[in-house]
Amino acid sequence: MPGWCGRGTRGRGCGDPRRSPAGPAVALGMAGAVLVASRSQGIRRAGFGCWVVGNLLWVVHGILTADLYVSIPFGFYGATAF
């Protein structure tokens, strides 16, 4: 993903996927999907928390990449989560 870091970074770390919030966002979303299927209310709550934090990271990623098609829907999901 060249240029994922957005404007104003002057090339520091651009294109380095280890610095992108997308990786942790994917991992948290997948973990949340598994955890919310649990029978335990505490584990389901933890899964929902993973999902919320993952969505927040998607919003950050969308802002950094200036991609409104990512940041707007995930921002909406986060706003309606509560």
Image (tube, rainbow, N blue to C red):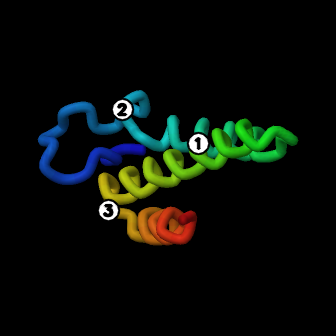
- Which residue sits at x=44%, y=70%? 72
Residue under label 3, please give it: 66
Q: Quadrant of the N terminus?
A: top left
Residue 18: tell me if it is visible. yes
The residue tagged with tag 2: helix, strand or loop? helix
Q: Nearer the viewer, residue 80 or 23?
A: 80
82 to 33, vertically: above or below: below
Q: CA distance from mark 2 to mark 1?
A: 19 Å
The residue tagged with tag 3: helix, strand or loop? loop
> Percent position (x, y) of residue 58?
46, 53
- Which residue sits at x=32%, y=58%? 63
Amino acid type of disc 1?
Answer: Cys
Task: Decide which of tag 3 and tag 1 comes sooner along the chain.
Answer: 1
- Decide if residue 7 is on the left or right side of residue 23: left
Q: CA distance from mark 3 to mark 2?
A: 16 Å
Residue under label 1, please give it: 50
Amino acid type of disc 2?
Answer: Arg
- Mark 1, Cα crowd under 10 Å, few <14 / some 14-19 / many 20+, is many
- Which residue sits at x=39%, y=51%? 61
- Which residue sits at x=64%, y=49%? 48
Q: Can you name the residue that lies furthest to the right here?
A: 39
Q: Can you name the residue that lies furthest to the top here?
A: 18
Task: Decide which of tag 3 and tag 2 comes sooner along the chain.
Answer: 2
Residue under label 2, please give it: 19
10 to 16, vertically: above or below: below
